[in-house]
Amino acid sequence: MVNFVIMSPKGIKQILCIEDEPEMIDLIRLILNRRGFEVKGANGGIEGLEMIRQDPPDLVLLDLMMPDMDGWEVYQQMKADEKTRDIPVIVVTAKAQSIDRVLGLHIAKVDDYISKPFSPQELLASVDRVLSKKSEA
């Protein structure tokens, strides 16, 4: 396997993981740090939105079911804000039914949708695909 670091104009690609389970943030950080990404964690939707507005990341990994503000609310607020609307979003959720996936990908137009539990390869492939698509745009 080839390891490489994806660089952005500001250096290493920044990924923000908005998730209410600290263990899941740690797991995602472990997987993506090995590939050269910098992963920050936000404990819930409200903290996540504040972090996005203060220092916009290159990509957001977004859980849907969180107690303070659900992921769809976070996503709507991001897309309504001129400064954050172009940040790609990958939904990472336990909502694995096909209707949820269709709603996410085709109605809400998220960039990708990953169901928990996921494999490290699935997460890495999704992140690489979404960031490649963004750099081509």
Image: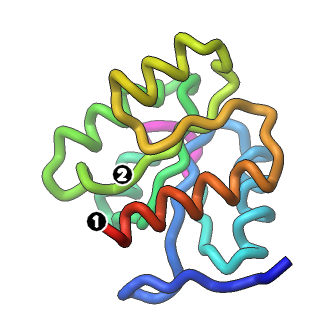
Q: How far apart are the alpha carbons under marks 1 and 2?
A: 26 Å
Look at the picture and state if 54 lies above or below 67.
below
Q: Could you say which quadrant of the image residue 105 lies in?
A: top left
Residue 70: image x %, image y %? 47, 25
- The residue drawn where x is 39% and y is 86% is 10
Mark 1 and 2 residues: CB-CB less than 8 Å, in contact? Answer: no
Q: Which of marks 2 and 1 precedes in the sequence?
A: 2
- The residue drawn where x is 80% and y is 46% is 23
Q: Could you say which quadrant of the image residue 36 lies in?
A: bottom right
Residue 93: image x %, image y %? 64, 30
- The residue indicated by pointer 1 is 137
* SS for callout 2: helix
Q: Which mark is residue 16?
A: none
* SS for callout 1: loop
Residue neighbourhood size for the residue with mark 2, other residues' Cα within 10 Å, grouped as few (<14), some (14–19), many (≥20): few
Q: Name which residue type carries label 1.
A: Ala
The span picked out in magenta is 42-47
Q: Name which residue type carries label 2.
A: Glu
Look at the picture and state if 56 lies above or below 21.
below
Task: Pick the residue in front: 32 or 119.
Answer: 119
Task: Pick the residue in front: 34 or 25.
Answer: 34
Evaluate whether residue 14 shows in this view.
yes
Q: Answer left or right for 114 relative to 116.
A: left
